[in-house]
Image (spheres, helix red, strand yellow):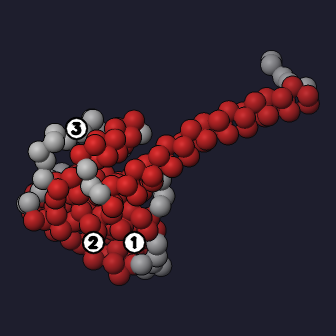
Amino acid sequence: MFSLNKLEMKRAKLLILMLLCVLSGANVAKCDEIDSLLTVFDKNPTVEVANKLMNCFADKQITDSGIVFNSSVPADTLRKTVSFWTGEWYLATGRYDKSADYSLVALPLLQACGDKENERECLSVLAICYMRLANYDEAIKYGQLCNQIDRESGDPDRISASLNIIGSIYVSAKQSQQGLVYMQEALVHAEK
């Protein structure tokens, strides 16, 4: 059997700690780069900056694939897409207030162009953010709007997912019985 003496164990722990610091430093640098690009984009939304942001999001595997804008894309499309993915980015990095802020910018733009798929995702992000921020009334509101779109789609997996989000919100709000009702309904849809 393999065993380490105390000195070897300390060295192994130190090596692991150093690796974690190096890896987290790269992640912080990418966060800082995205924050800097967003500051520039918020002041002057250009295609060049939007493409740099989308490239960063693709590198961090936030987007499914690289999104590239051409020079003739309308400003609302830039703002809608960048805000949507920024909301996703901040959700993934646990910055829920910023995620909600950007998602609230994206939401009316998604609604205006009839993009139900991404509107649903945006509503889901808002529900989760507000749950994490302990603003349960807002979380429930966005969770129910998400579920409404899912029910209109008829997709049992999506219906189940949004019901689970609503159930989780109620559980987080210390209303376990109400949460259980939604989670049980989610199971019914998941089994379809």
Mark 3 belongs to which amino acid?
A: Val
Disc 1 from disc 2: Cα separation = 9 Å
Near mark 3 (Cα within 10 A), the count class, few <14, some 14-19 or many ≥20, is some
Side (left or right) of 4 relative to 177: right
**Which residue is found at the position 22% from the left and 65% from the top?**
107
- Residue bearing the label numbered 1: 130
Callout 1: helix, strand or loop?
A: helix
Near mark 2 (Cα within 10 A), the count class, few <14, some 14-19 or many ≥20, is many
Mark 1 belongs to which amino acid?
A: Tyr
Side (left or right) of 106 relative to 180: left
Residue furthest right in the image: 6
Disc 3 from disc 2: Cα separation = 30 Å
- Residue bearing the label numbered 3: 68
Disc 1 from disc 3: Cα separation = 30 Å
Q: Where is residue 115 in the image (x, y as percent from the top left)?
A: 12, 56
Near mark 1 (Cα within 10 A), the count class, few <14, some 14-19 or many ≥20, is many
**Which residue is found at the position 79% from the left and 29% from the top?**
12
Query: Which badge, 1 or 3, is on the more N-terminal residue?
Result: 3
Q: Can residue 180 be seen in this view?
A: no
- Residue bearing the label numbered 2: 142
Classify residue 175 by image quadrant.
bottom left
**Which residue is found at the position 27% from the left and 35% from the top?**
65
Which label was assigned to residue 63? none
**Which residue is found at the position 16% from the left and 39% from the top?**
70
Which mark's residue is nearer the viewer, 3 or 2?
A: 3
Task: Note whether 118 is above or below 60 in the view shown.
Answer: below
Callout 3: helix, strand or loop?
A: loop
Query: Which badge, 1 or 2, is on the more N-terminal residue?
Result: 1
> Which image quarter holds the N terminus?
top right
Q: Can residue 152 be seen in this view?
A: yes
